[in-house]
Amino acid sequence: MKESLDCCGLECPAPVLRVRDALTQSGISEIVIRVDNEAARQNVCRFLEHQNYRAQVVIQDGVFVITGSNEGVVDAGMPINAEPVVVSPDTAIRKIMVLVTSAHMGRGDDALGDMLMFNFLKTLKEMGPELWRLVFVNSGVNFAAGDSEAVPILQELASSGVQISACGACLAYFHLLDLLQVGEVTNMLEIVSGMKRADSVVTV
């Protein structure tokens, strides 16, 4: 069965939510989604791939037309997840998710707040293997984009296995979507799903 969704004009995570709801129907072997912004394109494609659909994109009159196909291989009982389930080789290790919501730490002097947040990111490696995921939202996305001095720090964390994500809507708001240097674009559905899976969430 083929399904078509017009998600033009919708900001993330609305397109991903509509795709998720559509895929809960059994027998969908192909789904075509129309979106009109880059953040939605990236998030929808990644969500489809996480659900074992092959995503292909063409641009028609400025609109991204995404076709997801699983070539008829569908498990009707398979749960629809926002992201793939990653099984830790050591189930005893706790998973800590850190949510960075600003370019500054604390309230008061912004210059001091900038220094504190930078030092916080440098020190995160001290969490060791318990640091599972690092997510940037709002002005926090600046750390992962452009010529930020934090990029090498985040790249080191990523190389050690930490999942790093930046809110796609936030990147688009600050015109940084094409300047992301480390990690992947994410959306609110994935962020909330990550919070659910984490043993603890630290918000700064």
Image (cartoon, rainbow, N blue to C red):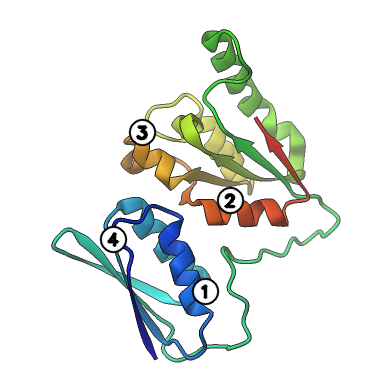
Image coords of residue 138 (percent x, y): 48, 34
The span from disc 4 to disc 2 (Cα, nearest Å) is 22 Å
Q: Residues within 10 Å of mark 4 (few under 14, many from 20)?
A: some
Pick the quarter of the image with the N terminus.
Answer: bottom left
Q: Which mark is residue 174?
A: 3
**Residue type at numbered disc 4:** Cys
Tell me which residue sits at (37%, 51%) in the image. 39
Labels 4 and 1 touching (C-beta < 8 A): no
Label located before the other in sequence (2 or 1): 1
Kindly report which numbered mark, 2 or 1, lies closer to the viewer in this rendering. Answer: 2
| Secondary-structure class at tag 1 | loop
The CA distance from mark 3 to mark 1 is 30 Å
Q: 12 or 38: nearer the eye?
A: 12
Left or right relative to 152: residue 107: right
Tell me whether the residue at label 4 lies in contact with that at label 3, contact meaning CB atoms closer than 8 angstroms: no
Type of amino acid under label 1 = Gln
Query: Residue at 61% of width from left, 20% of height from top?
Result: 105
* Residue underneath mark 4: 8
Labelled disc at residue 51: 1
Q: Nearer the viewer, mark 3 or mark 1?
A: 3
